[in-house]
Amino acid sequence: MKKATSIKISATSEQLAVEYMAGATIRGLAAKYGCSKQNISIRLLNYGVAMRHSTRMRPDRVCPTCGKIFQTRKKSQLFCRQECVRMKDTCIRGHELTEDNRYHYPGGNSRCKLCQNIRDADYRARKKARQL
Ligand SMILES: [Zn+2]
Ligand SMILES: [Zn+2]
């Protein structure tokens, strides 16, 4: 553990606290006073300032398979869990997924063949457009 007292920056803790509570961000203060974000938060915590949550909450999404509301781990996550990805019966474009129109990948993922056709046609069209 680093001792908070060893941190030297040009602003006093009070100054930081006032600016922080006036709406300044940790990142902004760190940039302004030329020190790390960690330094700023330690100074603020030692001064007794309650931290705002810096991590933004990711949006809730409704799983199209089971209808459960879940928090996405990454932007592209559409389903709450891997089983729901496998069990889905429509693709992102809303095509019905039957055994005939889905590609299966090793690892359990599948992809809609109709969408693949659209992507292929799109690709060919763009390629053709470039050649003209
Ligand atoms: Zn689900
Ligand atoms: Zn599709």
Image (spheres, grey):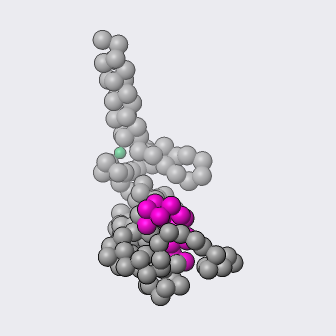
Does residue 40 belong to the magenta stretch?
A: yes
Q: Residue at x 36, y 67 (%)?
A: 59
Identify the image quadrant of residue 20.
bottom left
Q: Which quadrant, please, contains the C terminus?
A: top left
Count of residue discs = 0
Residue nearest the observer in this picture, 62 or 13 = 13
Judged by its main secondary structure, the magenta piece is helix
Q: Determine the residue positioned at 30% across, 18% down.
A: 129
Question: Residue at the spot x=43%, y=62% of the render?
Answer: 32
**Residue 12 rendering spot, x and y as whole percentages:** 47, 77
Q: Is residue 124 above or below residue 11?
A: above
Where residue 58 sits: x, y (%)?
Answer: 40, 67
Q: Residue furthest right?
A: 1
Report the quarter where the N terminus lies: bottom right
Q: Is residue 13 found left or right of 120 in the rendered image?
A: right
Residue 48 pos. (x, y %): 47, 88
Q: Nearer the viewer, residue 101 or 47?
A: 47
Q: Is residue 40 left or right of residue 127?
A: right
> Residue 110, how many percent across, how many down?
49, 49
Query: Is 82 inside the magenta-drawn segment?
Result: no
Q: Is residue 78 above or below residue 57?
A: above
Q: Magenta span covers which residues?
A: 29-42
Q: Quadrant of residue 75?
A: bottom left
